[in-house]
Each structure stands twice: as C-alpha cells, then as structure tokens.
Amino acid sequence: MNNNRCERPSTTTTVILLAGLPASGKSTLAQILKEHFNQNPFGTAKTHRLIHIEYDGIEDALMTKRRIKNDQSDIATHADDDTEDIRRREAWNHARQVAMNKLQAELGDGCRDGGDDNKDTIILMDDNFHLRGMRKQVHRFLLTYRPVRFGILWMT
C-alpha cells in the first residue's frame, strides 16, 4: 500500500481538473486565478499557492524541443503529414506523463518541510479531459495522496 499521506491537518491540497472543449476558457480562467492568488495588494500573508499544469503548454514545448533536435540532426523538418501526426501523438502521450509527474512532484513538495508549508495548495490541471479514462487516471492517482480534495470544473 502506498502511504503518501500528508500529515499537515492545518493545510489542504485541492486538485481541480479544468475540462472542456478547446477554446472554452480553461487556460484563461487558470491565468486569471493564478494572477489573483499571486497578488498581495495589502501586504498580508498569502494563504494559498496556485499551481497551473497546462497539458497544451507541455505538449507544445515537447514538439518545439523535438523540432530543434531534428534541426540539429540535419533531419528534414518538412516531414509528411503522417510523420507529423505520429510526432504530435507521441508528444501528446509524453505530455500526459510529464503532467502527472509534475502533479506528483507538487503533491510531494506540499508534504515536505519548509517553503510553502503553511499555505493551502490549489493545483489546476488544464486539459480537455474528454475521455473518462483521462479523468479517472488523475482521480486514481490522487487516492494514494489523501487527504487531497478533488473536483472537475467543466467549461462550456
């Protein structure tokens, strides 16, 4: 049994999946919330920290990294459509794993001593999550990190 319990009852961790169709406002909402939580206009102590894990950003970074690597290897950068689709699919799959690794790292950081120990943590996972299995993967993973709050915000 995986025993990844946080022993800090004074703080909470909440993971929210931002789900919905492309261009429904998921990333925009995440950016607005991030700006709000990072502002400290009255000089009061911040009580929350907000983490934004954006799948599209991770995927784009992986595709860019792959293009740079191909350019450095003198591989033709104008691959046919099938090859580009395969590369995009591989980056998509890799981005999902990278996002889960980032989530795991943030959950681990929240349970360690020091840093933001006295702050509640909100983690926004930003993707379309159109397949049930995509949502279930995150939920099952979080069950090993109790107590962690979990929710899905559907954007339309």
Image (cartoon, rainbow, N blue to C red):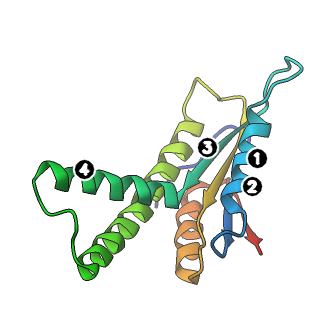
| Mark 4 or 3, nearer chain start | 3
Q: Is residue 130 above or below residue 118?
A: below
Question: Label 1 crowding class (10 Å Cα cut-off): few <14, some 14-19, many 20+?
Answer: few
Q: CA distance from mark 4 to mark 2?
A: 31 Å
> In the depicted view, which residue is nearer to us: 85 or 126?
85
Residue 24: x percent and y percent? 71, 69
What is the quadrant of residue 95 in the picture?
bottom left
Whole-number angstrom distance, CA of label 2 to CA of label 1: 5 Å
Badge 4 is on which residue? Answer: 68
Q: Nearer the viewer, residue 69 or 80?
A: 80
Secondary structure, mark 2, is: helix
Q: Secondary structure at mark 4?
A: helix
* Residue situated in front as seen by the camera: 154 or 10: 154
**Mark 1 or mark 4, which has the lower sequence index?**
1
Query: Element at badge 3?
Result: loop
Residue 98 visible to an observer of this rendering: yes
| Pointers 2 and 1 in contact (C-beta within 8 Å) | yes
* Three-letter code for the amino acid on which mark 4 is drawn: Ile
**Badge 3 is on which residue?**
6
Which amino acid lies under the numbered mark 1 shown in the image of this protein? Answer: Ile
Residue 29 is tagged as 2
Q: Nearer the viewer, mark 4 or mark 3?
A: 4
Question: In front of the other: label 4 or label 2?
Answer: 4
Residue at mark 4 to residue at mark 3: CA–CA distance: 40 Å
Asked if labels 2 and 4 touch by Cβ distance under 8 angstroms, the answer is no
Q: Crowdedness of circle 3 by 10 Å Cα count: few (<14), some, many (20+)? A: some
Disc 1 and disc 3 in contact, CB within 8 angstroms: no
